[in-house]
Amino acid sequence: MINRMITKSYKRLNNNNLIGNLIKPRQSIIYNFSINKSSNRFFTTNNNSSEINNTQQKPTTTTTTLRKDEIDFFNEQSQDWWNSEGTMKPLHRMNPFRVNYICDRLKIYNEKVANNPIHLPLQGLNVIDIGCGAGLLTESLSRLGASKVVGLDAAKNNILMAISHASFDQKLNENIENKSLQYIESTIENFSIENNQQFDAVCSLEVIEHVDNPKQFLEYLTKIVKPGGSIFLSTINKTFLSYISAILGAEYIFRMVPVGTHHWNQFIKPEDLKSYLKSNNCETTDLQGLVYNPLLCEWDFTNDLNVNYILHAIKK
Ligand SMILES: C[S@@+](CC[C@H](N)C(=O)[O-])C[C@H]1O[C@@H](n2cnc3c(N)ncnc32)[C@H](O)[C@@H]1O
Ligand SMILES: [Mg+2]
C-alpha cells in the first residue's frame, strides 16, 4: 500500500511540469517540497542554487565525470530502488554494515561524534552523500541526527524517488521541511564549483566504479571536505576474482543485479584509490574488505580486499 503511494507520488513529481520547465542541464537543482498529509499531494518547487550555503553564481564546469550510459541505467532502476527484495537487494543488505562502519570511524576521528548520545551519533555534523541513488544511506544519515545531510545524484529519477520515499516518513519529512535533509540533482563537479560549503563527512558508496575519470571525481570530492573531515568510499577491486564474483556471479549466475550493472574495466584497485586521495592531501586511515554470501543474502567484513571494499580517509 505504502509502496503504491510512494510510486504514485514519484510519478506525479516526475510529470510535474513545474519541475520539467525549470530544469537547466549541467547545473545543480535543489528540490524543496512538502506534503499535505490530508490530501497526500506534493507541493514542489525547485531552486537552482540559492538554498546551498555560501553559493557563488559561477558558471558550471565544461568537463564532467558523468557517463551518460550509467545515468540512463540508474534512472531506469529508480522505481525499484526501495524494493528490498528487488535489484537493489545487495545495497539494502549492505546498508547497516556501512552505516555502522561510518559511525565507528567517525567516533574515533571526530570529537563531536565521540561525545554524542548513542542514538544520535551524527548530531552537529554536516554530511553529504554523493551518488546517493534514491537515498538508502542518506536517510540513515539523517535519522542518526546529522544537522545537515545532502543527498546528491546525477540521475533525476533517483532524486525524485528519494524525495517521494522520505516524504512518507514523519521524521524525514520534517527534516526536509526544516532543510536539514536536502536532495540535489547534480554532479560532483558542478556542486563543488557552485558551492563553497565544506562537510565534516563526505560519503560516496558504490559510485566511483560508475563515473568517468575517477581521479578527477576525487579531486572535486576532496574539495568539499573540511580539513580534518572524513571521506568514505566503497567500490569494487579490479581483480580476476572480482570479474568472477561481481560480474559472472552477481549478474549472470545468481541474477542478484541486472546484467550490465558493472563493467570490469571501471573497477578500481585500492592502491590507486589511496594514491588519488594522497595526491589530494587525504590520508587513508582504514581499508576493509566486504564479502557477500548470495545464498544467505548477507554481507560481512573480511581482510580480503579482492572484491568489494570500503575505505575511510581523512583530509589533512
Ligand atoms: C550503484 S548506485 C549507488 C547508490 C548509493 N550510493 C548507494 O550505495 O546506496 C550509483 C549511483 O551513482 C550515481 N552516479 C553515477 N555517476 C555519477 C556522477 N558522475 N555524479 C553523480 N552521481 C553519479 C548514479 O546515478 C547512481 O544513483
Ligand atoms: Mg556498483
Image (cartoon, rainbow, N blue to C red):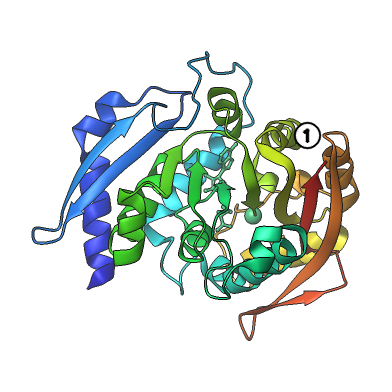
Quarter containing the C terminus: top right
User: Against 232, is 152 above or below?
Assistant: above
Q: Taking the image as four quarters, which one is ligand 2 found in?
A: bottom right
Question: Is residue 34 in view?
Answer: yes
Q: Residues within 10 Å of mark 1 (few under 14, many from 20)?
A: some
208 relative to 282 in the view: left or right: left
Q: Amino acid at mark 1?
A: Lys
Dividing the picture into quarters, in which one does residue 18 lie?
Answer: top left
Q: Could you tell me which residue is drawn at 78 percent across and 57 percent down?
A: 311
Could you tell me residue 108's position as x and y percent? 77, 64
The residue wearing badge 1 is 215
- Asked if residue 169 can be seen in this view, the reply is no
> In the image, 172: left or right of 265?
left
Quarter occupied by residue 302:
bottom right
Residue drawn at (23%, 54%) of the image: 9
Relative image position of residue 266 (x, y in whole percent): 74, 44
Is residue 16 rendered to the left or right of residue 91? left
Q: 164 or 67: nearer the eye?
A: 164
Q: Nearer the viewer, residue 177 or 117?
A: 117
Quick one: quadrant of the N terminus? bottom left
Direction from residue 294 to residue 32 in the image, left or right: left
In the image, residue 307 sits, relative to residue 93, either above or below, namely: above
